[in-house]
Amino acid sequence: MVGTPEIFTRGTVEREGAAGAAWLAELPSIVDELLARWECVPDGEVMHGGVGIIVPVLRRDAERAVLKVSFPHPGNVHEPDAFEAWGGRGAVLLHERDDERFAMLLERVRTSTLEEVRDGDEVVTVAGRLSRRLAVPAPAHLPRLRGQADSWEQQLRRDEGELTHTVPPYVVDAAVATVRELGRTQPDVLIHGDLHARNILRADREPWLAVDPKGYVGDPAYDGGTLLKTRALSLLDAEDLGRAVHRTLDLFAEAAELDRERVRRWAQLHAVQAAFWGRRHGFRVARSGPALDWITEFADHLAQLLTRPAR
């Protein structure tokens, strides 16, 4: 029987409550069942992400792989669909899937991530090139991001009116304009949906491969906004934060072969959403207290920087 890491167990129960505890109780038998069905044996220490465990395994031909089992959640439904569509192009290979169990047997890659690379320009360039490779014609059944546009606009206006904040009206108006002008008419292109440096891992078959996609269909420039949002705090030591932010946009757009202005507008929308989200829910790195206040203020500042064009 494969054990579950204590930190993962605790986090799942805190986040999901009784449903999480029930799933955790069933998880060892789920893993044992899948190992037997897919003829694998454990081959290393169990790892975990935010919502699932990852069991290193050996397949019957001694090929190295991982068994990933996630907590059942709507956000995980289309992950295997994305892997199937890519077929190993820029992402890990999908060997087997069990959608009822939210489980996959995947190509094993290394544990080091792109986030560990010290050269920030390299991080952004690698992510941009990978984003370009992942932008392929999308299967018809995958969720379209344009379907979220109305809820995005409604939430922006609700947050603007209900929350105590320092985001200027013109910044929120610019985010709403992006939703209306870019959000409602997006191309039928498969994108990662949660592209950041921790979701890009070193590999042997290729230098870098993507993991943990959402399987969204929409504008590839959306992923540029996701990347910048997650990279923003790493730019704090820059002599000129505005220039550093816009350089990140330039590098990503060039590497991904995207229109730079579209990337900027999506990034600005992400920043405004993050500024409001932090006030309602906190951030992964800070849920409350002075640290949360500081990061929220930084998100406000980032949103304003992205509202202005490059100097």
Image (cartoon, rainbow, N blue to C red):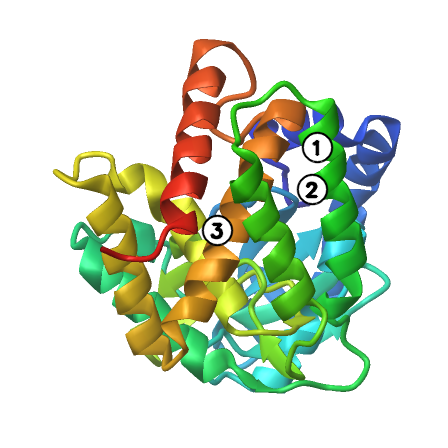
- 160 left or right, relative to 275: right
CA distance for labels 1 and 2: 5 Å
Quarter assignment of residue 255: bottom left
Of the pair 3 and 114, the residue shown nearer to us = 114
Quarter assignment of residue 254: bottom left
Q: Badge 2, how many Cα within 10 Å: few under 14, some, many 20+?
A: many
Question: Considering the image in quadrants, where does the C terminus appear?
Answer: bottom left
Question: Residue tagged by mark 3?
Answer: 268
Task: Give the residue drawn at x 24%, y 35%.
Answer: 236
Farthest-out residue, top: 289
- 67 left or right, relative to 130: right
Residue 132 lies, in percent from the top left, at: 42, 80
Question: Residue tagged by mark 1?
Answer: 159
Q: What number is the disc on residue 230?
A: none
Q: Earlier in the sequence, mark 2 or mark 3?
A: 2
- The reply to whether callout 1 and callout 2 are in contact (CB within 8 Å) is yes
Q: What number is the disc on residue 156?
A: 2
Task: Give the residue drawn at x 70%, y 32%.
Answer: 159
